[in-house]
Structures are given as C-alpha cells and as structure tokens.
Image (cartoon, rainbow, N blue to C red):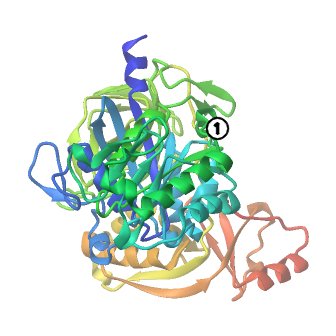
Amino acid sequence: MTKLTDEVKKRRTFAIISHPDAGKTTITEQMLLFGGVIRSAGTVKARKSGHYATSDWMAIEKKRGISVTSSVMQFEYQGKRINILDTPGHQDFSEDTYRTLMAVDAAVMVIDSAKGIEPQTKKLFKVVKKRGIPIFTFMNKLDRDGREPLDLIAELEDLLGIEGVAMNWPIGMGKQLKGLYDIDNNRVELYRKDDDDRYLPLDKDGKLAEDEPLAKDSLYQSTLDDIDLLKEAGNTFDKEKILKGDQTPVFFGSALTNFGVETFLDSFVNLAPAPQEHTVNEDEKLAADDPEFSGFVFKIQANMNPNHRDRIAFVRIGSGEFKKGIDVTLARTGKPVRLNNATEFMSSERVQVSDAVAGDIVGLYDTGNFQIGDSIYAGKKKIVYPALPQFTPEIFMRVTPKNVMKQKSFHKGMNQLVQEGAIQLYRGYSTDDYILGAVGQLQFEVFSFRMKNEYNSEVELHTLGNRVARWINPDQLDSKMSSSRNLLVKDRDGEPLFLFENAFAERWFKDKYPDVELTSRL
C-alpha cells in the first residue's frame, strides 16, 4: 500500500444535515470536543492561538442564533482525519447546503426526537439519497420528552424510504432518561455519568447482571421488550446496504448534554467510507488515490477574517496530494495557477497547510481567479468535475446604495457577495438597474447586513416580489416582448431572461409567442 493510499483511507469527510433547531451545530461542537479542538462546547479554539469562536462564526449568525453559511472543521480522531461540514439548516440557504453535499462522502442526519422528520430534512435527504452516499441518523434531544423510538424508526421508512437499523435504544426519555441500551457494543450507557463507570456490560443474552440496580427498573424492562421486538421484526444490520445509502444506522442521544455522541462518533468513524472515486470528464472514473492532484471549488466565502478582507475558495480534493506551491491548471480558463497560500479550518480560525490529500478540504486565498464549480488539476490531462447545482431564484429586489458617494465599496461588496453564490445578480436589459435574486427572504437580510458591516455600504432594497425566472434564446428575443408583467433582464453572463409576475403571465407569454423557447435553471 502506498503512503498516499494509506493517508486517503484515514479520511472521513461528511456533512451534517437537519431542519433548523434540531441541534446540528450542537452535535458538531460535541464532536470537536472529542477531537480535542475545543475545551468546552460552544467555544472553538484554533490549534495555535487562544482565540475562540463557534462554528456559527459570522456576526449575523451569532446575532440570530442560526447557521447561514457552511462551516468547515477538521480534526484527528482515533487515527482518522475527520472533515466536518456543518451546513445551514435554514431553508433559505438550501443552495449552499446542496453544493456542500457534493463535496462529502457521507452525511449525518440529525432529527429532533420530539418532532421527527421535518420538511427541510426531507428535502436535503433527497439530495443525499440521489448521490447514493451513506447516511447516519442521530435522533437528538433525548433529554426531553419525545416520540416513541419505534415510531421514529418507522417514519424513516415511511417518509424517506430508507431502512433504519437501531444501533442503540433509549431507556426512558426526558426527566426519566436513565441511559442507552447499546445494541452494537453490547452494553448499557448510563445517563449523567462521565467516567468509564458509565458503561455497564451486558451478558451473552443481552441483559444486565441481576445485582445492577437498573436491572429491576421498569423502564429498563420496557426497553428489553422493545429490543426483543427489534430482533424479531426490525431490520438486520447490513454494512453493504449502509454504504450504498439504502440503510441508515440509527443512534439516540442528546447533543446538549453530550450523551451518546461519543458512541455515535466511534461507530461513524468505523462504518463511514474513506474518499471514493469520482466521475470526471462526464464518464471517466477517477480514483481518490490517483497520484495526480485534482479538486473542485464548492464554496467561496469573503471576509472570513474581516480585518484582512480576504476571500477563500473552498476546494474538495478529489484525487492525489496537495503540496504548498503546487502548479495547477484552472479547467474553465486553461490558465496555470500556483497554489502558494492554502489554509485548513477550524470554523473561522485557520492554519496554514503544506500538504493534504483526497478527501480533505483546503481553503485557497483567492483574488478573483476562482468561481463556484471550478475544477483544478495538476497533471497534463484535463480533469473536469460535474457541474454543481445552481438554483433559479424565486424572490427579486432592486438594490441601490444609500450613499452614492460610496459607489466603489457598494460595487466591491455586491460583486464579492454575489460570487459566493447565495444571491444572484441581474441587470435591467436596457436600464442597467441592479436586481438581486434569491431563493429565500433571509438571504436579502444577510446581504444587507454584510454590506453594511463588512463593506461599510448601506443599501436600499425595493421588492419586486416573487417572480418566475425564465431564460430566452437571444436569437428569439425582441425587446418589445417585455412588459410590466414580464421584466426583461440579463444575468451575470449577459444572457437575457424574463422575470414573470406569476405563472399566469408566463402562460400568457407562451400563448402569444408559441415558438419562443423558455428555460429554467435547476
């Protein structure tokens, strides 16, 4: 086995998905605690400094208590190199999450055990399932009263169409929570105990010793009944199905009280796959341990360090090994780029990286060379990764600077934030007005907040409301087709499109111009 192959096999790169408030960021921080990179949940420290931050590093995230951008965190655990991508739970930021899901080898789905599967989880699950990557489920908030565990497992199959196989089982819940019956490790994990005495061994029949106080507890006896039922009628653990994404191992616990998280992380590290091969150049397979370096940009973020006004392109390494100073080719332009300045992450904190391998995420300091979806490669043979999803916006607003004397900072801020991909920029076809499009309202609030706080440029947003965006072939375009009900604009590439007031206006246009072809994006 080569050194590169050996290193690639140590990598575990995954995203955490959930509905807002299911506890995704909390479980991320508990994992970081076990990885030795934070001293207490809620505070993240850089490896070489005393500064602290959480995985919600952006100012507006701290203010609102939500994640609105993907964070990347890396640490060592049990001889493995873990790359966690904590995604926004808020539905208005689906696009950032969808792109992030293209850069991982597995996904952890966090579900609130009181609420079950919620709409955003269902949406994101479909993207993961489509990719066929393994999904691990953590039923969270066991410290509160929730739904029956059997119901939660059944819901996985009913709503998501995936087999759920229980790896552990609650002994009580809420104020009556006593512990977890750990099927996988044949032990009981006691609640609110921190040392090794929190584990009680089970005998060959899966039962506690008779002299254990818990053995006589009615909640424990009830759990044994559930375990018998699972053995009789539940799904059988099948690693092959898990790796294909057809079965999900289900773990119970409480991220807030750090209960069951370590057990979950131990199992995940053992079961989750190392980086897999990628499809490139439309139909070719590229092995992760192929010696030629290649990767793709799945995210761009400006001002991660507001003091330096930096811009970082996040690259998922798909094959080979990154070395500081490596010369690569940017596939889109064919231009050579030397990668002298790369970083790895602990949320907003970062350290210089001199080498990394397939599966790792590195940040490249960028002066404007890279775009989301760009492929880079070091060998002579061109390597192009599949295109990343781009959403058609649904809500549109005109944007103008409040202070016309600050045009420079207005344009700089707008261009940089648009390049991150959360909002999209259009211009009036004949007026050159600036029009922003987004999937959700919150994106405009974040845009306005960041323009003011990061670029010192206050903006005025004038709503155009919900619109139906449809692109038109320039050869078929006649400017007389435009009206108040179908606004003619151009996108960043100069391509013309109409913003229809509603579906009725689109139908009316199609009836009037039956030969004109209208298209949408994703």
The amino acid pointed to by label 1 is: Lys
Residue at the spot 56% in from the left edge and 71% down from the top edge = 439
Q: Residue furthest front?
A: 211
Residue 420 seen:
no
Left or right of 54, for residue 464: right
The residue to which callout 1 is attached is 241
Q: Vertically, is 276 above or below 175?
A: above
* Quarter occupied by residue 66: bottom left
Q: Vertically, is 74 above or below 322?
A: below
How far across and how far down the image is residue 165, in percent? 58, 47
* Quarter occupied by residue 444: bottom left
Q: Vertically, is 34 above or below 157?
A: above
Residue closer to the observer: 476 or 372: 372
Residue 62 seen:
yes
Residue closer to the observer: 170 or 404: 170
**Where does the C terminus fall, quadrant-wise?**
bottom right
How far across and how far down the image is residue 264, in percent? 40, 46
Left or right of 380, for residue 256: left
Left or right of 493, for residue 139: left
How far across and how far down the image is residue 249, in percent? 54, 46
Residue closer to the observer: 49 or 139: 139
How far across and how far down the image is residue 470, in percent? 71, 69
Q: Residue furthest top?
A: 1
Residue at the spot 63% in from the left edge and 66% down from the top edge = 392
Q: Vertically, is 197 above or below 456?
A: above
